[in-house]
Structure formats: C-alpha cells, structure tokens
Image (cartoon, grey):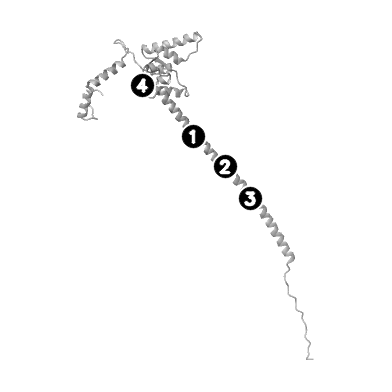
Amino acid sequence: MPLHKEVSFMTDTVRAEFINKRKHPDFLKRSNQARDNRLSGQTLEKFDPGHRQGSISTPQVVKKMAKKKDGILPTAAEVYESTHSVCVGNDEVELMGDKSQKVMGEYMEKLEEYKNKGIEINPDKVYLEVVGGQKKGKVYGLGSASQMYYKSDPTSQSTASSSTPSMISQLSSQVDELKKMAEENHNKVEGSQKIAAESLKCAKEFVENHEIEKATWKKEKLAMQKTLQEMASLVKQVYRPYKPPTPAVTRSRDTTK
C-alpha cells in the first residue's frame, strides 16, 4: 500500500504505526533483499521478466496442466515454458525475456543432440542438465515443484528444507489416503450390492411361494366346489319330502230310513 495515499479503512494511529514499521531497519533490509532477488541478473538497460504465474504456486500449475492431459504429469520443460511465456494468439506462445529463450533454446538443442546420437533420455534429465542441476534442493524454473520431478540432493539441502516434509512425501500420503478411501467405498458398494442381491432373492422366493400357494389354493377351491356340487346332487337323490298319508273318507249309513 503506497504511503502517500490516504485510506479510509484505518485510523490515523494505526496508519502512523504502519508507516513507522515500514521505516524500520529490519523491514528495509528484507525489502531491499527481495528487490535484489527480483532483479537478479537484470541490467539497467533491459529488464528481463521472470515467471508470469502471479500468486499461483508452481505445484498448482503442474496440477492444472496434468488435469488437461488426463492426469499425465507434464515435463519439467513444459512447466517452465508455461510459466515463462505469454499467449500471442492462435494458440501460440512467446517466451518472456532472454533468459527463458536461452534456457529453452539450449534444451531443444540438447534433445536434438541426444536424438541424433540415437540415445533415448528422459526429457526431465535434459532440462536438469541445461539449468545446472539442483541448488539447495530447488531446480531453476520449477521452484517448490522441483521435488515432484527430482529427488532431493542431500549435499545441497539446507537445514530449513530438511526439517519440512518433501512434496513427494506429501503427494504419496495423499495418494495412500485416496487409495484407502477408494477401497472403503468399494467395500461399501460391495456390501450394498450383497444386501440388494439378498433382498432380490427373498423377493423372488416370496413371489414364487405366493404363486405356488395361489395355485394350490385355486386347486383346493375347485376341488371343494366340485365336492359341494356332488354332495348337493346326492342330497337331492336321497332326500324325499315327507308327504303325510291322505285319510280315507268313509260314508256313514243313513239310519233314518
């Protein structure tokens, strides 16, 4: 934040303290060192820009590039070219500055040289050779993504870097965790499939038993109806309605005669 600009999001007391901290010798020392690092290798006549990825870390750039290539890790040179070039249209890129042009030029020459000699070599080894190997566990142009491509050189490790887990270890842990999650999900799916299969089997057995019972019940019903009909017929044949005998009519004699 420029010191000469007035701001409305902090009080005068806080702003004064902020300005005093920026004038402190320790702050000025770090600021000058950072400026020298940014301008390392530059001349007054010409400014040779470095990478163009902004605040995105190189491992994040590698991850995005790998995602576009169906999970295939890009070569170290491809990462360097991506972070040190600008798009000029029609899917064409242009390297920024003399340094990046020199690195990529030497890289392509080395590749062609090995090819002409009939030597098959890993492109990442060629890149490492061109940029001069590792320095304090880092490779020029790759930064914190160096250990994604190259094993750390024990002779060049700093005490600070040796106390932190390497990128490879972190990635390995993530891979192991993903494998574990995949295995757990697989087991869950298998369990669900087993339960579903057992439920389907029970349902089929229930339907089959129901059909069998239904058919048996239907047969029994028909047999019962037939039996009832036969019984009704027999009853009609055996049973005769009772008719009381008709009394005989007798005529009495007429005694009056």
Horizontal arrangement in the rendering, residue 184 relative to residue 88 (left or right): right
Q: Secondary structure at mark 4?
A: helix
Labels 1 and 4 touching (C-beta < 8 A): no
Res 78 → quadrant: top left
Q: Amino acid at mark 2?
A: Leu
Q: Position of residue 192 (x, y in %)?
A: 52, 39
| Labels 1, 2: front one | 1
**217, 250: nearer the viewer:** 217
Amino acid type, mark 4: Ser
Label 1 or label 4, whichever comes before in sequence order: 4
Return the residue at label 4.
Answer: 161
Residue 194 higher or lower than 157, as above or below: below
Distance CA(mark 2)–CA(mark 4) = 58 Å
Query: Which residue is under mark 2?
Result: 200
User: Upstream in the sequence, badge 1 or badge 2?
Assistant: 1
Q: Which mark is residue 185?
A: 1
Q: Say which of marks 1 and 4 sits in front.
A: 4
Identify the mark nearer the N-term, 2 or 4. 4
- Going from N to C along the chain, the mark reached first, 3 or 1, is 1
Q: Mark 2 or mark 4: which is in front?
A: 4
Which element carries disc 3, helix, strand or loop? Answer: helix
Distance CA(mark 3)–CA(mark 2) = 20 Å
